[in-house]
Image (cartoon, coloured by chain):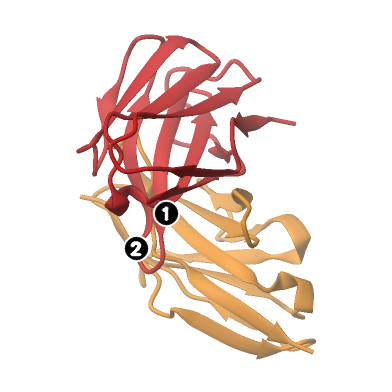
Amino acid sequence: AQSVAQPEDQVNVAEGNPLTVKCTYSVSGNPYLFWYVQYPNRGLQFLLKYITGDNLVKGSYGFEAEFNKSQTSFHLKKPSALVSDSALYFCAVRDLGYSTLTFGKGTMLLVSP
Amino acid sequence: DVKVTQSSRYLVKRTGEKVFLECVQDMDHENMFWYRQDPGLGLRLIYFSYDVKMKEKGDIPEGYSVSREKKERFSLILESASTNQTSMYLCASISGTSGSTFTDTQYFGPGTRLTVL
């Protein structure tokens, strides 16, 4: 089975500070990992994905994520948060044997001015 | 850019009504998906389709059916709407040529917020 966990319902950070949104996964094979962002009353927008290769993946809007196989984690990071980054963030995983993505429950990121 | 559109942003229906949610994608994608999103539960897969007239149940298919008569269009049907089907419904699509489904990006529509009274 494939599963993903986002241990924090909400993350609060001040503008200009670095941010981390955590994600851990469980798969039987090699994982394909994705991050999506959702702004209020909108659909999900793709941020970045890890398929293979470099463990540090860079994506849209200055976000990056680090794949850590030993810790089965794929945390989302940004060096300097913006108020406009405030949104709901979803991590998702797909194992090679599965045809569908499994999503985490989401983490609300609130960036204060 | 990939575009996935949904027929309504907001919909209000009464208990027992038959409800149709429409989704259209313009990138000739084989695979299409319907999810519902509820606070604290994340996204849950209702149904997906990997080709015209093909469908597979997701994690929570009860109370729903789907139709895919044309490649670009995937419809979600609530045969008899109930209040517990009040939710945000999200459609998505992904290209699905052999081997690439696993690594390709899934694109989402803007969502339909359905309220069943």
Percent position (x, y) of residue A88?
56, 67
Secondary structure of the residue carrying numbered label 1: strand
Classify mark 1: residues with Cα within 10 Å, few (<14), some (14-19) or many (20+).
some
Q: Position of residue B42 (x, y in %)?
A: 39, 60
Amino acid found under the numbered disc labelled 1:
Gln
What residue is pinned by disc 2? B41
Pointer 1 residue: B37
Q: Nearer the viewer, residue A99 or B117?
A: B117
Q: Residue at x 37, y 43 (%)?
A: B14
Q: Chain of mark 2?
A: B
Task: Tell me: A102 left or right of B28.
Answer: left
Tally of numbered tags: 2
Residue A75 placement, left or right of A26: right
Q: Are marks 1 and 2 in contact (CB under 8 Å)?
A: yes
User: What colour has chain A?
Assistant: orange
The chain ID associated with circle 1 is B
Q: Vertical placement of B59 versus A36: above or below?
A: above
Residue at 53 percent across and 38 percent down: it is B106
Going by the numbered disc 2, the residue's amino acid type is Leu
**Which chain is represented by red in the image?**
B
In-front residue for pair B39/B58: B39
Q: To which quarter of the image does residue A58 belong?
A: bottom right
Residue A15 versus residue A54: which sits nearer the camera? Answer: A15
Determine the image quadrant of residue B64.
Answer: top left
Q: Position of residue B52 (x, y in %)?
A: 41, 9
- Residue B49 placement: quadrant: top left
Q: Is residue B22 above or below residue B69?
A: below
Residue drawn where x is 37% and y is 69% of the image: B40
Q: Is residue B70 above or below residue A2?
A: above
Other-residue count near label 2 (Cα within 10 Å), few / some / many at <14 / 14–19 / ≥20: few
